[in-house]
Amino acid sequence: MSPARTIVVGITGGIAAYKAVNVVRAFVLLGHDVHVVATPAALRFVGRPTLEAISRNRVHSDLYEGVAEVRHVAIGQGADLIVVAPATANSIAKLAAGLADDLLGNTILASTAPLVIAPAMHTEMWNNAATVANIAILRARGVTIVGPGVGQLTGTDSGSGRMEEPDTIVARALCVLDESVNDGQPVGQVQDLAGRRVLISAGGTREPLDPVRFLGNRSSGKQGVALAAAAAARGASVTLVAAHLEVAPPVGIDVRTVSTAAQLQDAVTEASHEADVIIMAAAVADYRPATVQTGKIKKDQVGQTLTLELVRNPDILSGLAASRRQGQIIIGFAAETEEDADALIAVGREKIRRKGCDYLVLNRVGWTTGFTTDDNAVVVLDVRGAIVKDASGTKMSVANSILDVIAHTTISD
Ligand code: C5P
């Protein structure tokens, strides 16, 4: 499997947009971080929820959304590859002219990533002199044109203009990506975690109060899932201990589902014996209710105030670090609310010393940052408290930055 990359799939407004779902799906199943930029017309052919569920990321369509984060250029700047499927005659004309009157046009113009397009239209439109000239312009600029194929079109007619099959588009696109990101070498050879067994905890634990209520936290598990996908793509054998994920775990890895901190501890401890690397990305409850009611707590029996007695959960990360096998690398996470950067680092330095892990991934969280978002910004501290990585971007690119640290680490004592 190739290392995970950030792929933008542009979808324009043709009936073949429904097949673009399979293009998105294939990239996701290969472990890539896929961001769909759909034109408003494309969203009339295929629904946003479908594309969001399949891509596991928000779908972007509106030029005037996310203005504060300069999204109209940020998406293109962060892309390793842009694939437009289907590319209608209209969108091809706009690309050839360099128009930026929608989010996809802006994204493409703002990007230096290779561009692959899969045209789809009726034969007459494909053969029209305007389209022929536009395709020639794009080819001359280095754009890869996949298809179109010949076959049944939308109506009763058939001929040239049918969008290539999703598997063909994906295969061609990955060849283009291989050549671009690795100096012409196939990226499939970059398997820098091959042979390493990586254990990752992700999500947030829930501590039950009674059969219907729990104490929990806002962790979505997206960063841990991105780590699992990226590690698998880089050749690692991955076990994911998953606590209430809001996103689907990657296919092809060992997933163990848990709910409470105690269950997470059992699962992680068992899997830790086999692990070369342990990444504790999960948000684990520090406290749990002292007693769990067998029936629902009823307010008319409790009165105006309810006092909960909580007891400390064991610190799983510290326990793993204290009983680690020789050579095992252990990474903790710390989500903190300090506004001041120096104060945040100071908290991290104190925490890595206390936890005894090899690296600590430190990020600022708040009401609107860190949790549940698609992007993240972290610093990685080593055991001496030095900053060894400062990474921001999509959770997938942050995951790869964290794994870069691990890929270059061996612990001998
Ligand atoms: O102390 P704090 O909760 O901030 O530490 C966060 C790190 O410790 C995370 O890596 C988390 O997975 C881990 N942790 C743990 N057991 C706990 C609480 C947190 O392993 N009870």
Image: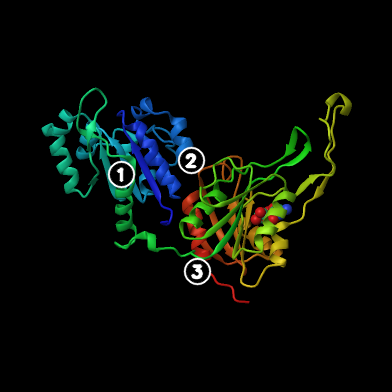
Query: Pointers 1 and 2 in contact (CB under 8 A)?
Result: no
Q: Earlier in the sequence, mark 1 or mark 3?
A: 1
Give the distance between the C-alpha atoms of the residues marked 1 and 2, in whole angstroms. 20 Å
Give the distance between the C-alpha atoms of the residues marked 1 and 3, in whole angstroms. 34 Å
Q: Nearer the viewer, residue 243 or 102?
A: 243
User: Relative to 215, does residue 48 appear above or below in the rendering?
Assistant: above
The crowd level at tag 2 (other Cα within 10 Å; few <14, some 14-19, many 20+) is many
For image coordinates 34% across by 58% down, the residue present is: 181
Ligand 1 image position (quadrant): bottom right
Give the distance between the C-alpha atoms of the residues marked 2 and 3, in whole angstroms. 29 Å
Residue 213, percent from left and from top: 75, 34
Label ID, residue 56: 2
For image coordinates 76% across by 39% down, the residue present is: 208
Q: Would you name the residue on which mark 3 appears? A: 408
Q: Earlier in the sequence, mark 1 or mark 2?
A: 2
**Of the residues shown, which amino acid type is indicated by label 2?**
Arg
The crowd level at tag 1 (other Cα within 10 Å; few <14, some 14-19, many 20+) is many
Label ID, residue 169: 1
